[in-house]
Amino acid sequence: MSPSKLQHTIDVADLYDEDTDTSTDGDAQETLIEKIAPEVHVEGAGSHVPAGCLPDEAYENALPPIRLAVRKRLVRCVEWESRVLGRWQAKLRNVWLDRYFLTTSMLGTHTFFMLFLPSLFYFGHDTTGRGLTYVSALGVYATSFFKDFACSPRPYAPPVTRLTIGSHHLEYGFPSSHTANSTSMALFLLARVYPLWVDSTLSTPAFSVIGAFLLFYVFTIIGGRLYLGMHGFVDCTMGFTLGVGMWLIQILYMPILEDWLRASGWMAPLTTLGVILLMVNQHPQPVDDCPCFEDAIAFMSVALGILLSVWAYAHVPFFNTVNFVTLHPGYQLDTPRDYAIWTLFAVIKLVAGILAIFAWRLIAKPTAQSVLPPFFRFLARFVRPLELPNRRHYTPATEYAHHPPHNLRPIPSMLDLSLSVTAEGADAAGIASALDGKKHSDGTVTRRGNGSSGDIGQPEKVSNFYKLPQQEQREKVLHYDADVLTKVFVYAGIAIVASLLTPTAFEVVGLGVRMS
């Protein structure tokens, strides 16, 4: 059997450093992994090089002086932080905290926001939905910008043992997007309820409970990033700073931008589209093949769709939620029957809204992938010798005849939702400033630099606790230039469907979006 497909059950002790106290009942030592997935796939040695861990020469040759200087300082911080976090984990880790922080880490993922935010528009909270979308989009773009700017690795595993749900471990470490998102979202929600407390609409005990919960949420996310070995102290500090900054931008400038869109003609949406495309174009190019850029595209495209919807609210009265009069069925909430009706139609609206998003995705993505490559090749004839702009790791349309099919399904697979659970550490290479990048005959990759004795030069291994068959078939992910504008088109459309078309449809069929 191939090592990359070896299947076995990992006991909880396998996930801990040897010095960690894992004493529990033998029968009761049921692991987090066994609950999440009964089959465990262990990748062979040298299966991947973590982002930010290529040879130093790769970054010296590719990065301009400012970016290189920033990266070198961050790498020195990562080396120190890795030792500190490794000792911290050895004292604190246990299976219950693993389970808690892994679960709560999902509250800071892009998947969570993409599923949670549309529901706000379905129930009449469009102002809150837009605000949360703005702070999330700005936070993801800002953190992705700095991730690709600095190309800084995550804490090294070992001495750190890294646990993660999804593909976030494939990204650079600095700064923490989870921290930025949780901080900006908590501040935004606190700012929303604060006026209610000032006006005595909300009692002091209730406001205190909400504030304490939001504070606990932020510290849970930040503490989890450190505990799980996903980020260091500098990463989280910068993420927190960016979160505060993005919240300030949202409350100070986004209302002004919305007012301008409402008062302007056709030039407003065209200008907004141009600015978003410029932000996509000016995103730093990383040395590693890091997915940060795609995260930034997705969320900024969602923000674009929301802004276009704001313009449509003002210029097409049919779409303006201010004019909606239909109330959600069961809105009285006076009797058990009212509660039952309210719940039933709430579920219907959520299911219908999600299906509408899936339907748009099913139609829009293959359409864009069919139209854009020939269009790019057509343009390429007229811009030579200047050539069309193209990003590193993305194949230009002039170099392929047909965009490979993506076997698109109406409902995204679990791989699309990034819910795989992985661990790095115990068998991985030791702490170092970089990898020496030389593959051995057995395919392993060794690190160079300082590390714990016995770890240096050992192959890096990643244990995938839930690895889907589709993932095994595409270890090497190929990117095409058409994918960039495809994401802009698809995700902007998702935002328009969720914030504009679906609420309007609910109003037309009598489901309503108003709660009172």
Image (cartoon, rainbow, N blue to C red):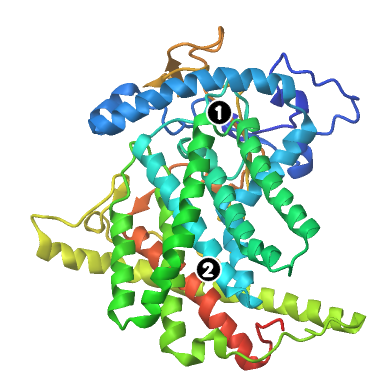
Q: Residue at x 70, y 39 (%)?
A: 101
Q: Residue at x 75, y 40 (%)?
A: 100
Residue at the farthest top position: 453
> Mark number for residue 397?
none
> On the rendered structure, is 220 left or right of 276?
right
Q: Position of residue 174 (x, y in %)?
A: 46, 36
> Mark number for residue 44?
1
Q: Which residue is mark 2?
A: 130
> On the rendered structure, is 409 left or right of 297?
right
Q: Position of residue 51 (x, y in %)?
A: 44, 34
Crowding at label 1, few (<14), some or many (≥20) Cα neighbours within 10 Å?
many
Q: Position of residue 238 (x, y in %)?
A: 48, 38
What's the amino acid at mark 1? Gly
Element type at marker 2? helix
Frontmost residue, 421 versus 478: 421
Element type at marker 1? loop
Frontmost residue, 79 versus 191: 191
What's the amino acid at mark 2? Arg
8 lies above or below 302: above
Question: In the rendered image, which quarter is residue 405 located in?
Answer: bottom left
Frontmost residue, 313 versus 95: 313
Question: In the rendered image, which quarter is residue 447 located in?
Answer: top left
Q: Residue at x 68, y 41 (%)?
A: 220
> On the rendered structure, is 449 left or right of 105?
left
